[in-house]
Amino acid sequence: MRCDRIWRNARLATMAPQAAGLGIVEDGLVACRDGIIVHAGPAAAAPASLEALEVVDCQRRWITPGLIDCHTHLVYAGDRAQEFEQRLNGVSYEEIARAGGGIRSTMRATRAASEADLIASALPRLDALLAEGVTTVEIKSGYGLALEHERKQLRAARALERERAITVRTTFLGAHALPPEFAGRADDYIEDVATQMLPALVREGLVDAVDAFCEGIGFTAAQTRRVFEAAAAHGVRVKVHAGQLSDLGAVQLAAGSNALSADHLEHLDPAGIAAMARAGTVAVLLPGAFYFLRETRVPPVDALRVAGIPLAIATDSNPGTSPLTSLLMAMNLAATLFRLTVEECLLGVTRNASRALGLSDRGTLEPGKRCDLAIWNIERPAELAYRIGFNPLHARVWAGA
């Protein structure tokens, strides 16, 4: 069998669902053709006729699937360091938001920026993720809050694929905050999101999923339902920011809409967990925001485990509540703050993260999957969640290259 490239003499963590734990293979080999894996497993089980244009000796390094950051707000302008200082002085996130800061502060800077400005400012953040083995990233809008500016954000996110070897999934988050021109008219704004913004952005091919911020400082469950109904009418899957500060029933609503994921989940009751389990909705944990806001209520991880709900981990990279551009650090925070196991952490940034994005073609090392790999200078997989501020990546492979 002819293929383009073979990685031999490697230890594999395949993350394959049929394998036990991380799917560890001690004497492993990965082969790809046209960017697709044709063999991933024991070298002894590889076809005898396997040959390639290039053979890479991994010298016993570990190979995992390329990492997936399934929740980011990577494209924006400005920063919110001043608000960080305010919180250190005792002002709450909710107080800052209600005083015109928070998301609306970033909205003003993002509206003032050009598309080229947004691309230029996002690239260093993206490069930090790529340097740690990330091969797929989700990027949300939600800092424009008007059609021309939401379009600008999503176009900038798409443009990052032309600048770097990365897969970008774009999520329309028009229902992120109420812009000033709609002050006191939240229902009217949601109607604009549902009937004007979303249809236009879908027509332009800029929307892979739709999200909403269902919170006391965001939008009500009824308003979120209107956004989800519009998404369904356009054949677009949904996600939800839910349970970060309160429980408004958003998780049940999202699960009832066949949501890909529900994200944050510090405030999550048994009814929400049961709804997620029935729908197959992924729980995306965002320990960076939990840490940065100094929250104390931990997501109900034990109950999620018992219900068999897949757990994903993401950076939530954003300027206000999680200025984090390290998925390795997110794993460490999830293990330390939420008590996730090493296995849960690694599955959370590979197989379960791919599921949170509705991508079945990646996240594991299996024949037929994309050849997105991360090759590591480590002795055991636990090191990826164990170290703080240390990057052991040896090489990143995207679509076989």
Image (spheres, rainbow, N blue to C red):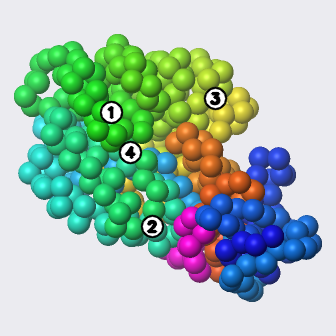
Give the distance between the C-alpha atoms of the residues marked 1 and 2, in whole angstroms.
Answer: 24 Å
Say whether residue 32 is magenta. Answer: no
Q: Residue at 33% across / 33% down in the picture?
A: 202
Q: Is residue 152 left or right of residue 68?
A: left
- The amino acid marked with disc number 1 is Val
Residue under numbered circle 3? 280
For the residues marked 3 and 4, what is the alpha-carbon distance in whole angstroms?
A: 21 Å
Regarding residue 362, the answer to whether it shows in the image is: yes
**What residue range appears in magenta?**
387-401
Magenta stretch: dominant SS? loop
Quadrant location of the N terminus in the rendered image: bottom right
Whether residue 389 appears in magenta in the rendering, the answer is: yes
Query: Image quadrant of residue 117?
Result: bottom left
Tag nearer the camera, 4 or 1? 1
Tag of residue 202: 1
Q: Disc 3 residue type?
A: Gly
Residue 91, compared with residue 219, is above or below; it is below
Q: Name the residue tied to disc 2.
A: 165
